């Protein structure tokens, strides 16, 4: 693939490489200065969790000791805590035990399998207990797991809090499909088209605008090696300075894909994060 040439290109602020035989499965930042990586060894069915400094990529802690080695995942973060959830049945993923983990130390503050975790918000955990005919909602202290309030079967209160939770996660900025419905389409479409001429139009490019920068992610159809070979694609990320109409960063996230990958990057403050080849977490700092 031929890239645009450009001077004064950006370079990664930091790169975290997963251990050998592990894939980066999920990444989840806190509001402040940590980011949690969920790593999986698909052959040995082992899950690991590694906490990094969001500014430097340095390890804060790793090798969290959990009862379940595979059927566990990152569920949420709130303030300086991460929340992990197990599954009771691998063949039917009913949620099981929840763990509250201090993001600074990796210490498990409490664990419980009495409730199904819903979300965490403003120092509280909201959970549900499902009975045969009713659902009962509970509000727990996020640092102790102590039950502070029972909302009985009042789903309206929980739904209102879910909306508040969604608003509280606005510090994570994600991309939108770049079409005529995108809020910035009329303003920047002509400026970025020269940089995505090779985009496969069957898969819409996704973009995020940050000041005079546009982060764009799209797919390119690879040239077939054999006449009847299945179509394969490359997933490309570029950062464009639209004020200068200049490409300042580019990378290939995946080669030889047979499917479309949406939501391949996100931003927090002036940092762009993406995963390359499921083995490297890359951070790019946008100039202020």
Image (cartoon, grey):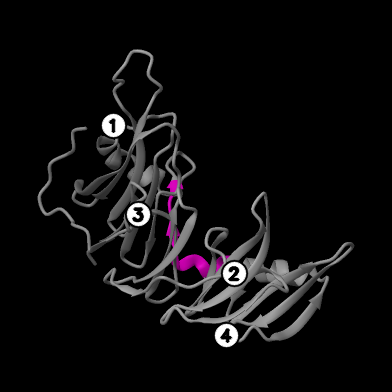
Q: Are marks 3 and 2 in contact (CB under 8 Å)?
A: no
Residue that badge 2 annotates: 165
Residue 126, placed above or below residue 280: below
Q: Secondary structure at mark 1?
A: loop
Q: Sequence-wise, which precedes: disc 3 or disc 2?
A: 2
Q: Sequence-wise, which precedes: disc 2 or disc 1?
A: 2
Please state the horizontal and vertical placement of residue 61, each as a whole percent of the image: 37, 75
Q: Residue furthest left?
A: 7
Q: Residue at x 39, y 24 (%)?
A: 231
Q: Residue at x 64, y 69 (%)?
A: 97
Any mark on residue 282, and which? Answer: none
Q: Secondary structure at mark 4?
A: loop
Confirm whether residue 285 shows in the render.
Answer: no
Residue 91, placed above or below residue 108: above
Q: Secondary structure at mark 2?
A: helix
Residue 63, placed above or below residue 222: below
Residue that badge 4 annotates: 143
Magenta residues, start to end? 165-176
Queried whether the magenta region covers residue 287, the answer comes back as: no
Distance from the alpha carbon under mark 4 to that under mark 2: 18 Å
Any mark on residue 197, and which? Answer: 1
Mark whose residue sits in front, 2 or 1: 2
Q: Sequence-wise, which precedes: disc 3 or disc 4?
A: 4
Q: Are marks 4 and 2 in contact (CB under 8 Å)?
A: no
Queried whether the magenta region covers residue 170, the answer comes back as: yes
Residue that badge 3 annotates: 274
- Seen from the viewer's position, the closer of residues 112 and 68 is 68
Are there few (<14), some (14-19), or many (20+) residues within 10 Å of tag 2? some
Q: Sequence-wise, which precedes: disc 3 or disc 1?
A: 1
């Amino acid at each position: 693939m031929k890239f645009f040439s450009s001077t004064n290109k950006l370079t990664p602020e930091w790169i975290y490489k997963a251990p050998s035989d592990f894939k980066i499965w999920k990444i989840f930042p806190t509001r402040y200065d940590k980011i949690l990586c969920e790593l999986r060894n698909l052959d040995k069915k082992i899950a690991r969790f590694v906490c990094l400094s969001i500014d430097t990529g340095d390890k804060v802690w790793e090798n969290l000791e959990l009862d379940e080695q595979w059927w566990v995942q990152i569920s949420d973060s709130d303030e300086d805590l991460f929340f992990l959830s197990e599954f009771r049945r691998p063949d039917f993923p009913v949620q099981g035990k929840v763990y509250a983990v201090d993001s600074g130390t990796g210490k498990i503050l409490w664990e419980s399998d009495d409730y199904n975790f819903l979300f965490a918000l403003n120092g509280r955990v909201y959970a549900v207990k499902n009975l045969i005919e009713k659902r009962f909602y509970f509000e727990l202290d996020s640092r102790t797991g102590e039950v502070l309030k029972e909302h009985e079967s009042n789903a309206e209160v929980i739904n209102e809090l879910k909306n508040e939770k969604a608003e509280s996660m606005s510090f994570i900025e994600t991309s939108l499909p770049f079409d005529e419905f995108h809020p910035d389409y009329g303003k920047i479409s002509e400026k970025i088209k020269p940089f995505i001429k090779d985009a496969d139009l069957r898969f819409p490019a996704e973009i995020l605008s940050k000041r005079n920068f546009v982060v764009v992610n799209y797919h390119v159809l690879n040239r077939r090696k054999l006449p009847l070979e299945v179509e394969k694609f490359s997933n490309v990320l570029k950062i464009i300075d639209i004020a200068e109409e200049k490409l300042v960063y580019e990378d290939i996230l995946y080669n030889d894909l047979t499917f479309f990958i949406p939501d391949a990057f996100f931003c927090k403050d002036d940092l762009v994060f993406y995963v390359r080849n499921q083995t490297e977490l890359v951070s790019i700092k946008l100039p202020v």
